[in-house]
Each structure stands twice: as structure tokens, then as C-alpha cells.
Amino acid sequence: MQISVTINGKQESGEVEPRTLLVEFIRYQLGLTGTHVGCDTSQCGACTIHMNGKSVKACTLLAAQADGQDIQTIEGVAPAAGPLHPMQEAFRDNHGLQCGFCTPGMIMSALAMVERHKGEDLDEQTIREELEGNLCRCTGYHGIVKAIAAGAKAMQGGS
Amino acid sequence: MYAFEYRKAASLDDAQKAFESADDGTYMAGGMTLIPTLKQRLASPSDVIDLDGIDDLRGITVDGDNVIIGAMTCHADVAASADVQKAIPALAHLASLIGDPQVRNRGTLGGSIANNDPAADYPGALVGLGATVHTTNKTVSADEFFTGMFETTLDEGELVTKVSFPIPEKAAYQKFPNPASRYSVVGAFVAKTKDGIRVAITGAGPTVFRVPEMEQALTAAFTADAIADISVPADDLNADLHASAEYRAHLIGVMAKRAVADCS
């Protein structure tokens, strides 16, 4: 079947099987390999993307379900040649990653979290609760939590 | 995944026609249980009928003494709804505890109750509040809707359309989550409704159930102490690598007491 999506602001279409997962379409057909497959069982969140502005796990959606929808992946967060997004910058500054495998999903979850808590103070407990759907096997999370707090602040124009 | 046909329904009628014309069709709401099941090849439907395009099935309204939630409303929307938070805060709280943020953005009320996973949270709220389930064929009380492990009164091709939750005087949900999956090992929903006290337990048995002894004791005195000596036998409870039946029986008392304490 033919599907077409808006992905990172660009119109893309492709031929998929009904059983093709959205993450397979994104990685193998569109070549956007920043979205990772960690567990493939809906647990780890490395495949987190935004669909119509909401964070979702691309390994637990069919490509067919994304037909006509608006998708954002890690590649669409900042311009390819330009500076990093403040949230990405905060991950670098706060040692929010080691191997980096979970990072795209962490960033996409972090951005969704900031959006959900707009105008509120994103405290440590809220960040930890909101990260329930993302696993990291390197950092022990402390750096990630600090990075998200700093990134959220930077996005609101703070220091 | 085995191959299947994907069909996106635009209306209830469209969905039911697609189901009837399929060899072995299945409906898909949010897909948070169905897609993992398909990936593990535990199911091989001929057709997956996606309900996501049926906008009539989505939405939250407060109508007098009831909160009415459309079957395709996702958990995140229930958790964030100002109307639900005001009318039945325990229900918004319960929705906020399901899975994780990404799952709550996709998983739906209708999908959860139609699947009736023994460890799902929503059955606790439906039975705990004495809700009414509306389907394409009938209107049925939550007490009758859930009939067994992964079993409900839904017939072949029948769809849940909405659930009506009576607004209680007080209610609370306390859950002991599996630390990895966030499914409830045991969840207790306690409500003081205009028809009396209700105590519903999910996660512990093959399907949600009420504890009449606790309801009677709480009618006499609505305090956590009133149910401190009431125990539920472990005989028919679930046992798995996460918790034995005896442990679940113990947790029922603990979670029910916490829920009662939370009501005040």
C-alpha cells in the first residue's frame, strides 16, 4: 500500500506492506537512521518520535497508521548544518549520554515533556516520572535528568 | 508479524462492515497491546481494522452526574482533562499511571476494557465507580461487562463506543505497579458513591472483582482501620514470577487501606 507522511516538514511517500512498522519505514525507506530500535518490544523508547506533536514509540505503530500524519524525528530537531537544539546542547553540557544509543529517544521524550509542562517548573521528580518510557543502560540517568532540566530552562529563554 | 490486510474505518458502520467481510478480522484501537501481540506472532488476523479515524468515538463530556468518555479517547487525554480532574480526580490519576507517556498517547479506554487484561487499570475504575459500558449492541453495567481473563460480554464484531462514569462523592485508586511494565500487580479502586461503597480490585485475579466484606465494613465506618482485619483468600488469585498468589492477597489489603486513606 502507498502511504505519504510529512516528516520533518518534508512530504515523503513510499510503498509499504500493511505489517511494516513505522520505525522500519523511517529507517530503511526514508534513510533517517537517527530513530533507533533498542528493544523492539515497546519498553525502551529509543524509537521515540513525535506524531502530530505527541511522543510515540515508532516500533509499536504500523507505517500505515502514520499515513497523512505529521512526523518529527531527531533529524528534524535542529538544522543539519546549524547549531544544536538547546535540548541537545544541554545533553552535551550535562553528560546526558555515554554510548548515545538511547539519546535520540531521550531528546524526543524530553521535548514532549517540556511541551506538556509548558509554563510549569520541570522539577527532578516530574522529569524522572516522565522518563518512564525511556531506558538508558549507561548513565544511571542522573546526567539525563540534569540535562533535561537545563534544556527546559534554556528553551524557556533562561540560563 | 504475519501478513494481514490493513483497513482504516471512517465510521462505526464502516468498521463493522469491514469486520463482517473479513475472514478473521480484528479491531485495532491504540494498538498498544495488539501490535506487540502481532510482532510476537501470537495472533494472525486476516485483517486489522483501524478505528483511529472514527472521530465520534473520541471525547470527554460531563453530563450532570456522569463523566462520559469516548472509547477511542487516549489515556493521556483522560489524565490531562480538567473536567475529569475536577469531577473524578481518581480517574484522571489512574489514567496517568498507565504504562508510560508514549503508551498513554496511543492507548485507549475502549481498547483497554475490550481486551480486559487481568493487570489493566481501567477495569478497576469501571467496577469501582459502577460505570456503564455502551457498545454498538447494548448498554451493560461494568459489573456484568468483565466476565473473565481477557473475556468480556462483547460479541463477535461488537464495539465499545463509550463509558459513562457516575461522579462519586469520594474515590481513590492505589496501585502496586510492576516496576518494569507498570501494569498493576494489584490495584485497588475505592469509591463512596450515591449507591454505596464500592471496592474493586484489579491485577490480583483473573479479572477485576469486588470485595463485599470490605464494602460492608467501610459502610459501617469509612476508615482504613475498618478493613485492617479483612483478608481475601489467595486460592483464586494470579501467581507469576512477579508475585505469588499469597503476596497478591496481602497487597489487596495494603492497597485497599491506602485507597481508603486517600479518600479522606
Image (cartoon, coloured by chain):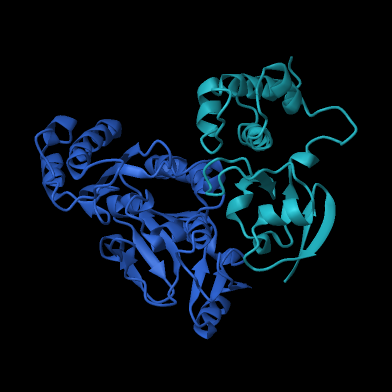
Seen as rendered, the residue at the extreme front is A99
Query: Is residue B164 something one can see in this rendering?
Result: yes
- In the image, is residue B138 above or below residue B113? below
Relative to the observer, which residue lies in front, B98 or B22?
B22
| Left or right, B141 with reference to B8 | left
Quadrant of image for the N terminus of chain B? bottom right
- The tint chain A carries is cyan
Q: For residue B170, what is the image quadrant?
A: top left
Q: For residue A38, what is the image quadrant?
A: top right
Q: What x and y, as percent, mark residue A80?
A: 87, 36
- In the image, is residue A112 above or below residue A21? above
- In the image, is residue B228 above or below residue B244? above
> For the point 73% across and 21% down, which residue is it?
A92
Relative to the observer, which residue lies in front, A24 or B248?
A24
| Left or right, B157 with reference to B141 | right
Q: For residue A158, what is the image quadrant?
A: top right
Seen as rendered, the residue at the extreme bottom is B21
Relative to the observer, which residue lies in front, B220 or A137?
A137
> For the point 63% across and 50% down, which residue is it?
A58
Q: Which chain: blue?
A: B
Quadrant of image for the C terminus of chain B? top left
Q: What x and y, as percent, mark residue B241?
A: 30, 43
